[in-house]
């Protein structure tokens, strides 16, 4: 185990790196300057693209080869999408599909 | 500017917005806390870690580092690498967080995947002080993460309830926000570019998909920009 001081330095190092990745754009895009057109454009198109990236990132540890072949995740996403298309209530879509997913992985799709 | 909504009303709206993150973060935070306890660090260390270095992926990776030789430089470089995608979040929020001066530092510090997805997607009600909403939401999300880590390390592996699968709340959150983005922008292309680029990079690069995905997304979006001039 690390000593207390070592651990604090270790956490600060990880935290600093994380903060830098979040802060860099704000250093270059200061309040006083007009926001460049290309940044306004990216600000408009990046959210959908990034959220698409995050969906895939959430699926990176899902194996379609091994049991249960990603079936619970696929069904969960279909339920979330269908519920949201139907009622457009974010809380209902997210909690409904999460409960369905938990039931699937805990009771229905037990390890083969 | 903030006359219509009281602090309590803004907090209530922020809390409602943050509920899916509450579920997901408690689940994943618990997992982090349990792993910290297994490494011999108590609940206060787990909470402090989540307070200082707020980012799920890097924290899980750091646990692997904890059992090897002491090397904070490696933790620093690794956090730059795995959190590189946050640069996109800053670019997106630069205009929305403009004018807040130093008050935007807490917003930047807490700009996680989930907080970014919400602040870039949610329509702030007319007349609500946007800064307060952004700040409350950022702090709420971060606090769920800290509380989850704390509880995980406190109760360890002897969790009384089986939470397996609760982390799906975050996948569902992204699916829902993705649909909202498409509905609001009346243009599905940016979303499709994000999904497609990431899927290709996952198949080609596996776990190291993030940075190639970002490069591909930026390349396609910038190339496509010339066709976008007629849109506002």
Image (cartoon, coloured by chain):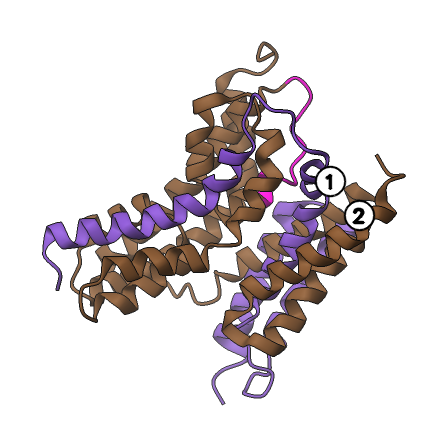
Chain colours: A purple, B brown
Can you see residue B88? yes
Q: Quadrant of the C terminus of chain B?
A: top right
**In the image as oriented, which residue stretches furthest toward the top?**
B3
Secondary structure beneath dot 2 equals helix
> Which of the two residues, A79 or A44, is positioned nearer the viewer here?
A44
The circle drawn on residue A41 is 1
Whether residue B157 appears in this view of the structure is no
Residue depicted at x 65% and y 46%:
A90
- Label 2: how many residues lie within 10 Å, few (<14), some (14-19) or many (20+)? few
Count of numbered circles on the image: 2
Q: Secondary structure at mark 1?
A: helix
Residue A30 placed where, x, y %?
54, 28
- What whole-number distance in Å separates the C-alpha atoms at marks 1 and 2? 8 Å
Residue B194's mark?
Answer: none
Region in magenta: B117-127
* Above or below for B213 versus B80: below
A84 sits to left or right of B114: right
The residue under label 2 is: B225
Q: Is residue B123 a member of the stretch shown in magenta?
A: yes
- The image position of residue B114, as x and y in percent, is 53, 48
Looking at the rendered image, the quarter that the N terminus of chain B falls into is top right
Q: Which residue appears at 66% of the width and 41% of the height?
A: B121
- B183 and B76: which one is in front? B76
Overall secondary structure of the magenta section: loop
Q: Residues within 10 Å of mark 1 (few under 14, many from 20)?
A: some
Tell me if label 1 and label 2 are in contact, CB under 8 Å: yes
Where residue B230 sits in the image (x, y, percent)? 90, 39
Chain bearing mark 2: B
The residue located at (58%, 47%) in the rendering is: B88
């Amino acid at each position: 185990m690390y000593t207390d001081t070592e651990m604090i330095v270790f956490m600060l190092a990880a935290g600093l790196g994380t903060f830098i990745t979040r802060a860099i754009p704000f250093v270059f895009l200061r309040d006083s300057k007009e926001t460049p057109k290309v940044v306004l454009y990216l600000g408009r198109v990046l959210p959908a693209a990034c959220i698409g990236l995050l969906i895939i990132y959430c699926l990176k540890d899902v194996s379609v080869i091994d049991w249960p072949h990603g079936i619970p995740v696929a069904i969960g996403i279909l339920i979330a999408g269908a519920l949201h298309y139907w009622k457009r209530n974010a809380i209902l879509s997210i909690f409904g599909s999460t409960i369905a997913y938990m039931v699937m992985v805990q009771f229905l799709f037990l390890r083969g | 500017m903030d006359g219509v909504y009281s602090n309590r009303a803004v907090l209530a709206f922020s809390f409602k917005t943050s509920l899916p993150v509450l579920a997901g973060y408690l689940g994943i935070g618990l997992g982090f806390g349990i792993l910290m306890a297994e490494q011999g660090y108590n609940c206060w260390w787990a909470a402090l870690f989540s307070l200082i270095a707020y980012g799920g992926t890097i924290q899980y990776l750091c646990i692997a580092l904890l059992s090897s030789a002491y090397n904070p430089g490696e933790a620093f470089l690794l956090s730059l690498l795995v959190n590189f995608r946050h640069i996109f979040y800053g670019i997106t929020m630069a205009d929305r967080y403009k004018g807040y001066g130093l008050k935007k530092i807490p917003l930047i510090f807490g700009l996680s995947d989930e907080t970014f997805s919400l602040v870039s997607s949610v329509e702030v009600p007319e007349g609500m002080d946007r800064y307060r909403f952004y700040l409350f939401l950022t702090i709420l999300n971060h606090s769920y993460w800290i509380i989850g880590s704390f509880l995980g390390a406190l109760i360890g592996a002897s969790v009384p309830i089986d939470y397996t699968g609760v982390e799906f709340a975050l996948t569902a959150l992204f699916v829902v926000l993705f649909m909202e983005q498409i509905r609001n922008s009346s243009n599905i292309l940016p979303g499709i570019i994000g999904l497609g680029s990431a899927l290709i990079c996952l198949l080609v690069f596996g776990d190291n998909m993030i940075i190639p995905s970002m490069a591909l997304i930026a390349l396609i979006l910038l190339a496509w920009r010339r066709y976008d001039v007629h849109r506002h």
